[in-house]
Image (spheres, rainbow, N blue to C red):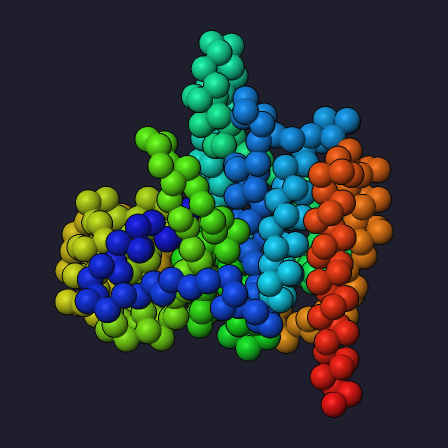
């Protein structure tokens, strides 16, 4: 979920806060991807016509591996250097939203199976995209493929987005690549959205929508909305975060922004607005999550691992039943691009 309806606040500024970009803008840049965020995107979008996930001959889900291969091959060919950050132990305050998500997945699975029996494939696919889950085996397979592709993998001690933000704060990466806005509250100077879903998308009613990457600069956001980072966190807590998903009943984006501007902080808003006081939000605990996140500092990012085309092919084709004819060209093309780039770099260094 991230922060509920935070993007609706952006309309309070006459200056566009989201900057539309192109994938080529990130050439030669390092980006920290929130791994779970990305994997769930792949699991939702990469399915057959009935809504079923792609699987190997043992019935193990491989949709996420298809996404990792295709999307990261594209990023690598564009000269982008991804880093994948995996979630560690969740904060106890996140238990409520995790349980809500589990229940929603169970309901979606039941509706999916019902739609399949009724032969309603459109409805089946809709519910299938909501019934996603990640097992430890799926995560291990994802890490293995990323490593074979030469992409650094980091296991965060806590929230993946917090760790991605920390890498960005330290200047080790250009920004945090995620669909959620939590990384801004964790202090990431830059977040980049839509890198894994950019391109043409069919609309339900017909037609095509072009989705481009977009970038949000925390300093610009704070300046144009005239909010400090602390006030942005306070605003997010009013709206509802992963650590208080209900937010405050009756307070939407415009009201939350108005209260923070009027009273200056969550604490003063709580003193003056009865609904905020009645919500009994553990404000200080949530504030500490964002201001003092459980992260590892000064990680040594290792980009020295090579893209191993042979090992990637063996893993995907021999172990995961990928079609060699369909995916071998992608693997070989990416390998050629990397080799050509290395040759050019060596030539430039020579002169």
Residue 344 to residue 45: above or below: below
What residue appears at the point 72 percent right and 42 percent down from the top-left corner?
Answer: 327
Give the vertical position of 121 relative to 163 (above or below). Answer: above
Q: Is residue 336 above or below residue 48?
A: below
In the image, 233: left or right of 93? left
Nearest the viewer among 8 and 204 is 204
- Count of marks, rendered view: 0
**Can I make out residue 278 in this image?**
no
User: Measured from the top left, where is residue 43 in percent x and y?
Assistant: 57, 38
Decide which of 122, 153 is in the foreground and name it: 122
- Residue 174, visible in the rendered structure: yes
Task: Estimate the x, y position of residue 230 in percent, counting from the top left.
Answer: 34, 70
**Quadrant of residue 146 in the image?**
bottom right
Q: Residue 191: which quarter of the image?
A: bottom left
Q: Position of residue 100 (x, y in %)?
A: 44, 36
The residue drawn where x is 20% and y is 62% is 12
């Amino acid at each position: 979920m991230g922060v509920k309806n935070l993007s609706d606040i952006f309309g309070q500024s006459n200056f566009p806060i989201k900057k539309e970009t192109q994938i080529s803008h990130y050439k030669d840049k390092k980006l920290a991807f929130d791994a779970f965020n990305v994997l769930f995107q792949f699991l939702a979008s990469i399915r057959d016509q009935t809504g079923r996930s792609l699987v190997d001959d043992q019935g193990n889900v491989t949709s996420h591996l298809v996404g990792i291969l295709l999307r990261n091959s594209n990023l690598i060919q564009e000269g982008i250097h991804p880093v994948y950050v995996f979630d560690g132990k969740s904060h106890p305050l996140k238990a409520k939203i995790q349980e809500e998500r589990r229940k929603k997945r169970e309901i979606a699975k039941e509706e999916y199976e019902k739609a399949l029996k009724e032969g309603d494939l459109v409805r089946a696919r809709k519910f299938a995209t909501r019934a996603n889950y990640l097992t430890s085996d799926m995560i291990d397979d994802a890490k293995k493929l990323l490593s074979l592709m030469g992409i650094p993998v980091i296991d965060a001690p806590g929230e993946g987005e917090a760790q991605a933000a920390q890498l960005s704060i330290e200047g080790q990466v250009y920004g945090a690549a995620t669909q959620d806005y939590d990384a801004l509250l964790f202090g990431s100077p830059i977040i980049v959205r839509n890198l894994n879903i950019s391109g043409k998308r069919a609309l339900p009613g017909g037609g095509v929508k072009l989705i481009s990457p977009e970038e949000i600069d925390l300093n610009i956001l704070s300046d144009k909305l005239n909010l400090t980072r602390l006030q942005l966190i306070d605003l997010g807590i009013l709206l509802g975060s992963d650590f208080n998903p209900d937010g405050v009943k009756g307070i939407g984006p415009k009201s939350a922004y108005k209260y923070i501007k009027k009273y200056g902080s969550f604490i003063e808003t709580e003193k003056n607005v009865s609904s905020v006081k009645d919500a009994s939000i553990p404000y200080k605990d949530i504030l500490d999550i964002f201001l003092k996140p459980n992260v590892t500092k000064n990680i040594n990012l290792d980009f020295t691992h090579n893209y191993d085309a042979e090992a990637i092919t063996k893993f995907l084709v021999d172990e995961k039943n990928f079609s060699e004819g369909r995916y071998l060209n992608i693997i070989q093309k990416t390998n050629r691009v990397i080799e050509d780039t290395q040759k050019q770099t060596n030539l430039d260094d020579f002169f």
